[in-house]
């Protein structure tokens, strides 16, 4: 049993060391470390928690992670909007896709040809 506790304690210590290694104070940034930190973020995909007066104030993350977070936020907002709009939706108020296509004056062949030229990210 003591081996398991020791292992758990070691894991907690390792996690704490890892967390501390990702923290940087405002004063460290202002002493010329900002450029080095930005390089680590960009090249090594490392994240930093910026501390001011012993309190977390900001996070420095790679731009691709920021883009992913922004996209996830936008997707989440769209999901909430769609759920709100469909909350009281009744089946009789809906039109089949085939009917919508016909009313718009398209054919499925035209839609399929257009679909081939569209790129979805």
Image (spheres, rainbow, N blue to C red):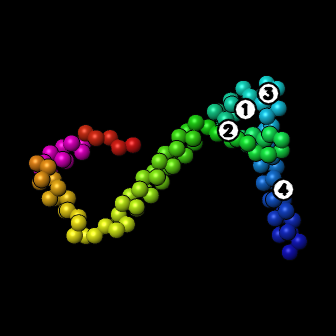
CB-based contact (under 8 Å), mark 1 and mark 4: no
The crowding category of the residue bearing disc 2, from other C-alpha atoms within 10 Å (few below 14, some 14 to 19, many at least 20), is some
Q: Is the stretch drawn in magenta largely helix, strand or loop?
A: helix
Q: Residues within 10 Å of mark 1 (few under 14, many from 20)?
A: some
84 versus 101 height, above or below = below
Q: CA distance from mark 4 to mark 3?
A: 29 Å
The residue positioned 55% from the left and 39% from the top of the image is 64
Residue 115 falls within the magenta-colored stretch: yes
Magenta stretch? 106-116
> What secondary structure is marked by label 3?
helix
* Residues tagged 1 and 2 counted as in contact (Cβ below 8 A): yes
- Closest to the camera, between mark 1 and mark 4, is 1
Q: Nearer the viewer, mark 1 or mark 2?
A: 2
Task: Name the N-terminal-most of marks 4 and 2.
Answer: 4
**Residue under pointer 2:** 60
Disc 4: which residue: 13
């Amino acid at each position: 049993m003591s081996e398991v506790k020791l292992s758990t304690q070691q894991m907690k210590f390792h996690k704490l060391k890892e967390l501390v290694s990702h923290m940087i104070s405002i004063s460290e940034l202002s002493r010329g470390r900002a450029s080095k930190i930005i390089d680590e973020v960009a090249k090594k995909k490392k994240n930093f928690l910026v501390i001011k007066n012993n309190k977390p104030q900001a996070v420095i993350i790679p731009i691709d992670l920021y883009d992913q977070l922004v996209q996830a936020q936008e997707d989440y907002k769209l999901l909430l909007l769609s759920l709100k709009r469909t909350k009281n939706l009744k089946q009789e108020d809906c039109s089949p896709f085939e009917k919508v296509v016909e009313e718009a004056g398209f054919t499925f062949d035209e839609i399929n040809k257009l679909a081939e030229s569209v790129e979805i990210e």
